[in-house]
């Protein structure tokens, strides 16, 4: 049995999550942390009531969400207007969604 591909979009430094992805992984949460590793970007839920991280905002009546991560993405040269559709997967050990290096232009030619 194969898993359904989970996709998020990146455009202008913002991450777009459809309602189903948000409800599956971040239901009821207001913010996420983004962490760049050598081989990926991690999208980690912040479950504390303390402030911090990047806000998850509602985009439309369907419940689709957007994470405004322009500052973070700008440091990685990923704040351009070209839209990228990125496959992600849940990592149980890290407790977050992973965007793999092979799907991001910042890692191309980095010798994965």
Image (cartoon, rainbow, N blue to C red):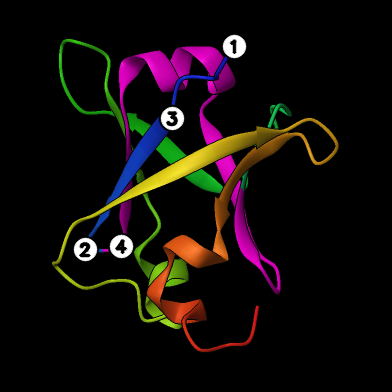
Gap in angstroms between the C-alphas marked 3 and 2: 20 Å
Q: Nearer the viewer, mark 1 or mark 3?
A: 1
Q: Nearer the viewer, residue 78 or 50?
A: 78
Classify 1 as above or below 84. Answer: above
The residues bearing labels 4 and 1 have C-alpha atoms spaced at a distance of 34 Å
Count of labels shown? 4
Front disc: 4 or 1: 1
Camera-nearest residue between 28 and 9: 9
Residue drawn at 43 percent across, 43 percent down = 87
At mark 1, the secondary structure is: loop
Residue that appears at 46% across and 81% down:
108
Q: Label 4 vs label 2: CA separation?
A: 4 Å
Query: How packed is label 4: few (under 14 Cα within 10 Å), some, or many (20 or more)?
Result: many
Task: Verify CB contact (< 8 Å) between mark 4 and mark 2.
Answer: yes
Q: Which numbered circle lies on residue 13?
A: 4
Quarter of image, res 46: top right
According to the picture, the residue beneath numbered tag 3 turns out to be: 6
Can residue 28 be seen from the camera position used here?
no
- How crowded pointer 2 is (Cα within 10 Å; few <14, some 14-19, many 20+) is rated as some
Indicate the quadrant containing the N terminus: top left, top right, bottom left or bottom right: top right
**Residue at which label 2 appears:** 12
Task: Tell me where residue 41 sits by quadrant.
Answer: bottom right
**Of the image marks 1 and 3, the number of the one nearer the N terminus:** 1
């Amino acid at each position: 049995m194969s898993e359904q591909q989970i996709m998020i979009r990146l455009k202008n430094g913002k991450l777009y999550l459809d309602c189903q992805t948000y409800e599956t992984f971040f239901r009821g949460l207001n913010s996420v942390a983004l962490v760049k590793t050598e081989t990926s970007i991690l999208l980690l839920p912040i479950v504390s009531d303390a402030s911090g991280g990047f806000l998850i905002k509602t985009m439309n009546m369907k419940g689709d969400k957007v994470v405004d991560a322009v500052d973070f993405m700008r440091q990685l040269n990923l704040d351009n207007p070209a839209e990228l559709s990125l496959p992600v997967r849940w990592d149980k050990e890290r407790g977050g969604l992973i965007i793999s290096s092979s799907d991001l232009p910042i890692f191309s030619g980095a010798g994965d």
